[in-house]
Image: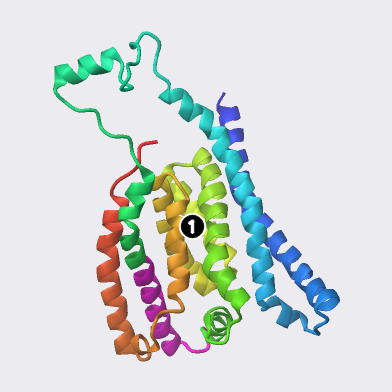
Amino acid sequence: MSTNKQNNKGLQLFFAAVPLLISFLISLIAFFAAVFIHGAVLHTEMTSAEVADDGLVYLISYSLMIIVFGFWYTMILQERAPFSAKTEKPEEGSGKKKGNGKSESEKNESARTGKKKEKPWNPVKYWATRLPILFVIGYGLQLCVSALIAILSTAFPSAFASYKELIQSLAGSDIDVMTFIAVSFLAPIGEELMFRGVTFHYAKGALQIKSAILLQAVLFGVYHLNLIQFVYALVIGYLLGMLADRSGSVIPGIVLHMIINLSAYLIPGIFIDNIPKAALSAALALGIVIPCLIVMLRKKKAR
């Protein structure tokens, strides 16, 4: 029995890592698709490096991620659905339902205890009231990350040179529309489906919940293939994993992820153009984000 459990856990861990490998394959497919489109369709001459940084590659890559991992995550939800429906089905002999939907036993229990039955949990209403908090958290996290990187890049300019070039290509003032759409809207959907949807699902089958959250966060950091991005992607990925666990859905994480990515275009340079300003911005951001995170993550949806 224990051997079967160990094998099952090993299989779950394997499936938790598979999405990361598939994402690299998708990136390769997107690159060659962009090369073909530029050469055979648009008749534009571009080097391999220019194609790799082209917005079309990001657009194709994240679109494929949404299709692949969206389908995979839908299959996961369908597998879980019968169990949810079964637990919600009333037991035999509990009493017949009346016109208002309550059984006789439920009415007798309410009359005996004097307590009203709690209203069913409404995820739309719940998260709609917390949307402003998501905006504050998303912008605050991006401001904090930008400020800390501004401080560190001033102290260690050579170590951050390649990173600054990457960020300039993704969030600079001269980016193309396709890159903006891919980074701001498609990437959050694809990455949340991949990591907080598929990867997290299998990680939970093999590990304790905190370890599962950490594993998907580590893989999220590795996915960025950059040491600097790995560090802050690890932290943000862990927070997004906690949000997915407490909400029981990837939707809040998608919204927060979009806000974080969009905020990269909305951080005024004057906030981080020198070390004192950047340090103050980081401190203020943390002072606002931490209480908001406590409020956001304190309630766990019963599943």
Q: Does the magenta-highlighted stretch encompass residue 145?
A: yes
Number of on-image labels: 1
Under tag 1, what secondary structure?
helix
Q: In which quadrant of the rendered view does residue 292 lie?
A: bottom left
Q: Quadrant of the N terminus?
A: top right
The residue furthest front is 99
In this figure, which colouring scheme has been used for the structure?
Answer: rainbow
Q: Position of residue 143 (x, y in %)?
A: 37, 76
Q: Residue at x 58, y 47 (%)?
A: 16
Q: In which quadrant of the rendered view does residue 32 lie?
A: bottom right
Amino acid of disc 1: Ala
Q: Position of residue 204 (x, y in %)?
A: 49, 42
Q: Does the magenta-highlighted stretch encompass residue 105?
A: no
Q: Is residue 70 left or right of residue 296?
A: right
Q: Is residue 147 above or below residue 94?
A: below
Q: Position of residue 211 (x, y in %)?
A: 45, 48
Q: Residue at x 16, y 18 (%)?
A: 111
Q: Nearer the viewer, residue 220 or 260?
A: 260
Residue for badge 1: 217
Q: Quadrant of the C terminus?
A: top left
In this picture, which residue range is highlighted in magenta? 138-159
The residue furthest top is 93
Q: Tell me the chief SS of the magenta region.
A: helix
Q: Is residue 169 above or below residue 251?
A: below
Q: For label 1, count other residues whose C-alpha is less than 10 Å away and answer few (under 14), some (14-19) or many (20+).
A: many
Q: Residue at x 47, y 47 (%)?
A: 212
Q: Position of residue 233 (x, y in %)?
A: 48, 66
